[in-house]
Amino acid sequence: MTGAVADRAHGGGAEGAVDDGTRVPYRRWRRWVRSLRRNTLRSRAAESGHDPHDRVYLAYGVVLLGLVYGPIAWSALAQAASALRTTEVVAAGVADGPAVARLVAGGLLALGVAGAGALAAARAGGPLWASRAEVTFALSGQFPPRAVLRRRAAALVAGAAIVGAFGATALAWGAGDDAATVLAWGACGACLAQVPLAVGAAAQTPRWRRAAWTVVGLLLGLGGLAALGAALTPAAAPAIGVACLGPDGDPAACAVDAGLAPGLATGGLLVGAGLVGLACVLLVLVSLPDEVDVDAAAAGHRRTVAAVQGLAGGESGAVADVLGPSVLSGRRATFWPSLLGRAPLVARDLLGLRRRPGALAGSAAVGVLGALLVLLGGAAASAPPAGPGAPGTALAGTTLAAVVGAALLYAASATWSGGLRALAAQPEPGTLLPGRIGRQVAAHAVVPSVVAAVVTGLGVAVATLLDAAGSAGLALGAAVPGLVLVLVLVVVLAARVWVAGATSAPSGLFTPMSTPDGDASMLVLGAWYLRGWLVVIGAAWLLHRAGPDAGLALAVVLLALAGVLVRSAVRRLATA
Amino acid sequence: MSGATEPVVDASAVSRTHGTVEVLAPTSLSLAPGEVAVVVGPNGSGKSTLLRLVAGRDVPTSGTVRVLGLPAREARRRRREDVALLLGGPSAYPDLTVAEHLRLVASAWAGRHPGPSVDEALGAAELTRVRDQLPGELSSGEAQMFALATTLYRPAQLVLLDEPEQRLDARWRAVARRLIGRAADAGRALVVATHDPDLRADLARRGREVELSAPGPR
């Protein structure tokens, strides 16, 4: 990399200087070499028993799937976006302030979450990936990394634009915007989708990595603040209303659907999104390919390929290594001596968490959000709505909130239960320490339980704040949401224990399962990998669907299920 | 070896067959408390299999294995505090350093831990240099020595070691021999499978040698 920069600095059109672009030895004969390579690849593929046209079939399959499922996904998104419709009081000309605030918050949070995903992708060898062979040639100076990366960057830019436009147009159309506005939103989406891509590519470079993390932190922070602000701001009371009558002559609601946020996707927003998108595209295409740490990218790429191959073979152990070694930014932390003497495994787990403060903070934030959503989902549907436009009114009592909240809690609990996972991953679990394996599992469950309790408390506090502001639509006075949250937490922790350490799928899952649609064994294998998520989501869905009447019976069932899950894990670890 | 004392390990004509392949020919082994046995034989003769059977990780095709007076599978569940194992990689936590592992072991066993101190144990295993390294940061030899040191650092009546010398250079093999010798001197019963001639000679001098026959034609 340094060499490439030095060469460029040395070049500048001076006669005899070697230009990076011409260092590719076969540039003059490019067409001939490319055809030679194509033919060689074809003959090699044929010799190894593969179909030389595999890639064509792959492209055909992708396009076909896109054409079949794309419109379905677009319609589903548009349908989901119907909840985003805002009301506009035409006569008064009052802008729906909280709706705009919610839109801004949603946009910032979506960008932040996508950026966080891109940061994770950067540790897994993407988005600008490089193979080992390419890195060998690039690092030995035969061609600069950008010769390989720039074309991929262009493809990624196009892909991100398509995805962004796809999502934004569906949401805008579902929210009731007219065609011109939908197009404007699509353009905004295409431009803003470049932000996560640029963040991911920047995180692959040593120089821009910190900036990428800062951008994601800012997006999430501002999005969170905007969401809180929107939630705490009561909807503007219309100064002038329009009286409407129903067919029977009684007064009826006559809100006018006005799309995502009336008049927002014009002018400034479009220009702003365009400028941001242009800056990101320039970064991704021009600046970053020269600075990407291709060695690290190739290593991440190798890990990802190994994980995918392992998954196909029934082994999910490599998935934990996809992101590379854990970053222990709090490595200077040490045991608390008093706790180490009394509860060694609790002290160990606590030390493990203190050594990953970033992960702990992130998981706590996700956990609080999850707890809040579970509370919203469990809130009595009969609770009086807090007011037009309040977020709680849209989510309170919905299955979606309960299920997404439970899934978020499960995701967050992965960080809290690192000690348990490490115990289960040992070749001889728990043989270094005294006590039966059940006791060790119980000791390792203390820290996750305490953190879960704290996070839940924070979630309840936030819900209380929202409730006090009259914008959450919660009925916290009722015991049901609290009971639902506790049960979900119990199932989440039990599922974590259950899943811990079992990385190899039982061989019986590979038995072909004939169905009218073909072999379903891969589907079963996928379900096995996702078993923890499925149990948690299923429990949350059941809790929500059963309602308060069946609450006690379902609570008993779920507690029994949790007991079975933990017992099964302990038995497996004892005989591992 | 006192006749009145119950053997720590009592394997009687134990064998193991996978499909049509006999991976361990019928073998007997009886070990009194504090006694040492070194298991030797060419690759494929069943050394690791014998140790796995004694550890209760596998069940014999024929014969019986009793450990501390219980069937091996039962002892694995009920007497795990009395048996230390090194049959695979180290049983480690990825976010604790080498020294912290020993500290955790010493604290967890509290009054039952006879010593030495963490610093002395690290010095004896020549791991002082990497005391603040995480397990993932160790070289393969260091990781093997770390695994051996932590296995021997915890109290146990019976210690099972499967090729403790693997990936160690000559200097560290000598250190490993010294550590294992100290464990034997401390009165622990040891079953060690090894290819290292020096370790074999050392342990054979202290106890008995179990030589497994070469596998049949492949």
Image: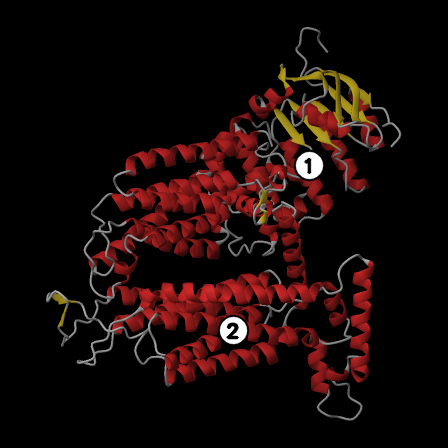
Q: What is the quadrant of residue A511 in the picture? A: top right
The outermost residue toward the top is B4
Which amino acid is tagged 2? Ile
Depth check: give the residue in front, B123 or A278.
Answer: A278
How many numbered badges does the structure rendering display? 2
Please name the residue that numbered disc 2 is placed on.
Answer: A162
Kindly check if marks 2 and 1 are in contact, taking CB atoms under 8 A apart as contact: no
Tell me: residue A225, above or below residue B13.
Answer: below
- Residue A337 visible in rendering: no
Q: Mark 2, chain letter?
A: A
Q: Is mark 2 on a helix, strand or loop?
A: helix
Q: Do labels 2 and 1 share a chain?
A: no
Q: Is residue A116 left or right of residue B23?
A: left
Please name the residue that numbered disc 1 is placed on.
Answer: B88
Tell me: residue A56, above or below residue A452.
Answer: below
Q: Quadrant of the image for the N terminus of chain A?
A: bottom right
Q: What is the quadrant of residue A538 in the picture? A: top left
Which amino acid is tagged 1? Gly
> x and y percent of residue B17 in the render?
76, 25
* Residue at image point 39% right, 70% down: A171
- Residue A46 visible in rendering: yes
Q: Mark 1, chain letter?
A: B
The outermost residue toward the right is B217
* Residue at image point 49% right, 30% down: A438
Q: What element carries label 1?
A: loop
Q: In this view, does A564 lie to the left or right of A553?
A: right
